[in-house]
Image (tube, rainbow, N blue to C red):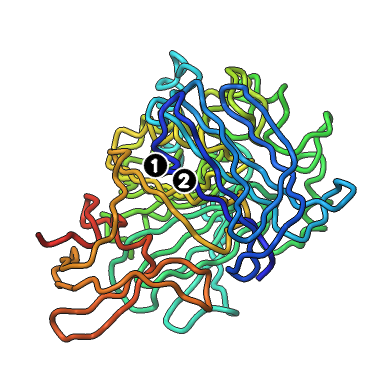
Amino acid sequence: MSKYFKCTTNKNPLTYSCGEKITFSVSAKDNCIDTPCNYIHWKLMGDDGKISEGLGSFKPGDPLKLETTLDKPGFVYLTCVSVNDCGNPDNIFDTLQAGAGADIENIEYQDVVPDDFDEYWNDIETLVANFDYEILMNEPVTTGVPEGFKCFELRISTPEGRPASGFVSMPEKEGKYPIFISFNGYAIAGSGAIYKANHIAVHFNAHGIENNLTQIELKKKYFHELVKNKNGLSYGFDPEENASNMTCYWRNMMIRNLIGLKYIKSLPQWDGKNITASGGSQAALQATTLAAHDKDVTFLEIAIPWFCNLNAENNGFVAGWRPKFAEGLRYFDTVAQAKKVKCPVKIFAKLGDAICRASTIMALYNNFNVNKKIEFLQSGDHGYNPPERNSFYLWDDPQCQETLLPGKYKHYKGGEYELLYIAKNSEGYCEEQVVYKSLTDGKVWIRPAHMWNDLVLDGEIYVKRFEKIN
């Protein structure tokens, strides 16, 4: 475990009000133990436009404290980097990316949905429904398949551009199974097979390209189409393409996904009832769009969702990493898609994510008009999870986080348990653990504390994993 910074706030970081003082406390850690750090360069950036930075230090028992406020609904982001005597980053400590928000339930979509949004997507849904696809490849996979599964590589024709390309796996045992469909994040890559117990598991790549080519082969073959176009930009970032909803790269990507799922639903092994769409980053955009326009999707589970609230930077919000706002992109903004989703939604996000800013993700959360839940991890960047996990949750009510108290609880499946202690694992990530005992057989169990008050899907609604018995 490397050295790192730990950040805490003086209250739940999701519950500040505009104008209220936000206090960040930063400590330096080595394997969960306080360790000195002589020079810490810190920077605060708020969605209200305030920016401040400076140099601080940490000594055990004396955390670096930073105070700020937010003047409008949004987030403030903290970055801390360890530096040497000359003021240059020394990479001794992992970079800290943290955050806190004010009046986040009031973060709004910074654009308007186009008047012809429904017409545009109805045309795509009709195109998909009426298209007679061809199976271009359906070959059994013979290597790396776990016992009890069978797997096939697929290529399915689409009405525009390249085919839907990926893999499908399912149990060898005859039966009816739910569908689990997922995608890749932003990358020029084929997909790989995934396996999920008692599920038809599907993984399509974003581009309809070959799955067995190396990165070098892919970049060589698709250099001018995906790697760098005539303007020197990677796929999906060309403002000329993005000016129109008919020429932007995302259109054909979403059509491929919808055609791919259409084929999977035709499989006799599907139970005809349950489909989970899942993915992180760009894949969250794809999964959300799939759920918005295929009404058979019954659950949406996304992480660090990308492409949200694309016009936010033009209204003063701290910028993330994504294409610059353009007219054609308004039809693909993940927030615009949220209004069309009718199934329950579960989101995982990170307060310090510099690529997918927390403010854009809250705009997404606020625009889902369904049973929804979000987990924000403190101090996590887009591809980095902190050694000490500290999560905060919302589900419909921003003040949902509860203190874990000893006593009797009922599991949502019916069993009764007694919460005995809150403990820490000295050999793990220093995350709090719940120690609890079954009141049926007396067995003692442990579970990460962040999962105790978690919401789980029971049928078609979310319920608490454990409900306190008064």
Task: Judge whether 59 appears above or below 12 on screen.
Answer: below
- What residue is shown at x 75% (from left), y 52% (from top)? 82
Q: Residue at x 85, y 46 (%)?
A: 87
Q: Give, as a three-letter code, the residue at label 2.
A: Ala
Q: Position of residue 23 (x, y in %)?
A: 52, 39
Give the side of residue 460 with respect to residue 188, left or right: left
**In the figure, residue 434 lies in which quadrant?**
bottom left
The image quadrant that residue 421 belongs to is: bottom left
Expressed as whole percent of the image width and height from the top left, the position of residue 361 reads: 48, 37
Residue located beneath label 2 in the image: 287
Element class at badge 1: helix
**Quarter residue 20 falls in:** top left
Work out whether 10 lies above or below 269.
Answer: above
Q: Nearer the viewer, residue 76 or 279?
A: 76
Closer to the camera in the image, 259 or 333: 333
Q: Are marks 2 and 1 in contact (CB under 8 Å)?
A: yes
Tell which of 210 and 183 is nearer to you: 183
Q: Secondary structure at mark 2?
A: helix
For the question of whether residue 122 can be seen, the reply is yes
Which residue bears the numbered disc 1?
291
Query: In this rendering, is residue 177 above or below 243?
Result: below
Tell me if mark 1 has few (under 14), some (14-19) or many (20+) residues whose alpha carbon lies within 10 angstroms of its own: many
Location of the C terminus (image quadrant): bottom left
Q: Which residue is farthest right?
A: 86
Q: Residue placed farthest to the left in the image?
A: 470
Q: Is residue 379 left or right of residue 267?
A: right
Which amino acid, mark 1? Ala
